[in-house]
Amino acid sequence: MINRVLNFFQRRLYYFFNKNKYRFLSSKAYIQKLLRIEGKENISIHKGVIIQKMTWIAAMPLTKAEKCHLSIGEGTIIGHFNHIFATGEIEIGKNVLTADKVFISDNQHEFSSINIPILSQGIIQLPKVTIGDGSWIGENVCIMGASVGRNCVIGANSVVTRDIPDYCVAVGSPAKVIKKYDFSINEWLSV
């Protein structure tokens, strides 16, 4: 009971001191101790969102993209040690579940010159990343410049670099669809 009361007051204090710093912050979101947060003015966190401890979230227009926005939809749970970095646009839908140590990015480091350290070559903008409502992103997954459809499962340790359609299970590096839901027989089928 005491923990619930303390959590309630912790949430209220966080909201009170940060609500004007975000693009949007719901009073019903629960943000645990973050590792790092950058670009709050470009981040929207909706009702019922839970962001677990030691996560790094950022929305910084490092590539000078026209729009820089990170949106985390209602009811989504972001696991521990996630790293989500938007330089353009990342939209995580409603009721998405990410396991621990998930990386989601719409950018990558430039590496074309072998004579310049990668650290000094800048950032490349990748396509917008969208994660559809109801999807589950497994442990250690990397999603870079690709979208995941609604109600998908992305298996642990997968690397998503191409779009995954709605109602699919994808695994591997690079991630490939291994199952798809067939609405005509209401079953998951191997592909």
Image (cartoon, rainbow, N blue to C red):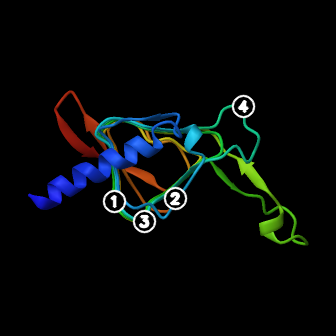
Q: Are marks 2 and 1 in contact (CB under 8 Å)?
A: no
Q: Residues within 10 Å of mark 1 (few under 14, many from 20)?
A: some
Residue 175 in percent (x, y) is at: 47, 55
Select label 3 or label 1 by which is in front: 3
Q: Earlier in the sequence, mark 2 or mark 1?
A: 1
Disc 2/disc 1 C-alpha distance (Å) = 19 Å
Residue 58 in the figure: left or right of residue 123: left
Disc 1/disc 4 C-alpha distance (Å) = 31 Å
Q: Which residue is mark 3?
A: 54
Residue at x 33% of width, y 37% of height: 27
Q: As rendered, which of 82 and 154 lies closer to the eye?
A: 82
Q: Are marks 3 and 1 in contact (CB under 8 Å)?
A: no
Q: Earlier in the sequence, mark 3 or mark 4?
A: 3
**Farthest right residue in view:** 115
Q: Earlier in the sequence, mark 1 or mark 4?
A: 4
Disc 3/disc 2 C-alpha distance (Å) = 27 Å
Residue 180 in the figure: left or right of residue 81: left
Amino acid carrying mark 1 in the image: Ala
Select label 2 or label 4 by which is in front: 4
Q: Earlier in the sequence, mark 2 or mark 4?
A: 4
Select label 1 or label 4 by which is in front: 4
Residue at x 51% of width, y 39% of height: 22
Residue 139 in percent (x, y) is at: 36, 64
Select label 3 or label 4 by which is in front: 3
Q: Residues within 10 Å of mark 3 (few under 14, many from 20)?
A: some
Q: Which residue is mark 4?
A: 66
Disc 3/disc 1 C-alpha distance (Å) = 13 Å
Q: Which residue is mark 1?
A: 99
Amino acid carrying mark 4 in the image: Glu
Q: Name the mark on residue 174.
A: 2
